[in-house]
Amino acid sequence: MSADSFKGDEIEVSWGPELFTPIQYHTITVGPFRVKIHIQPGETEGAAFSRGWKYLDRMGRQAYQDALPAFLDRCKQAGLAVENARHR
């Protein structure tokens, strides 16, 4: 969540990994993400950073929405496998 580097007309914005625990002791990791933003003529570094941050926020939200159903399905499948093994 910082401006990592300034390279003249370019800025790199980073979002570190986030851990979510939808089920106790089991996590989903979203990120890390990075994007390089070209600073537009007349734009400040702060405005370019905000633009990059908004992009990463959308990416992070989408990654979480994509990861959660797959994660829950894997947990369900693991639970079914354990239950099937008990009944053998």
Image (tube, rainbow, N blue to C red):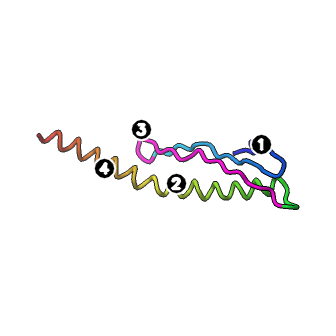
Cα distance in 3D space between marks 1 and 3: 36 Å
Amino acid type for the residue under numbered disc 4: Lys
Q: Nearer the viewer, mark 1 or mark 4?
A: 1
41 or 44: nearer the viewer:
41
Image location of residue 26, percent across then percent down: 42, 41
Q: Is residue 22 left or right of residue 55?
A: left
Q: Residue at x 71, y 48 (%)?
A: 13
Residue occupied by mark 4: 76
Please state which amino acid type lies under the numbered disc 2.
Answer: Ala
Quarter holding the N terminus? Answer: top right
Between circles 1 and 3, the one closer to the viewer is 1
Q: Mark 3 is on which residue type?
A: Tyr
Disc 3: which residue: 25
37 over 24 or under it: above or below: below
Marks counted in the figure total 4
Vertical placement of residue 4 versus 57, above or below:
above
Image disc number at residue 73 = none
Give the alpha-carbon distance from disc 3 to disc 4, as whole Å. 15 Å
- The C terminus sits in image quarter: top left
Q: What residue is disc 1 on?
A: 5
Q: Report which quarter residue 84 is drawn in.
A: top left
Could you give the CA–CA distance between mark 4 and mark 2, rounded to whole angstroms? 20 Å
Q: Which residue is mark 2?
A: 63
Residue 16 screen position, x and y as percent: 62, 43
Is 1 placed above or below 44 here? above
Whether 26 is among the magenta residues is: yes
Q: Residues within 10 Å of mark 2 (few under 14, many from 20)?
A: some
Where does the magenta region start and end?
22-40
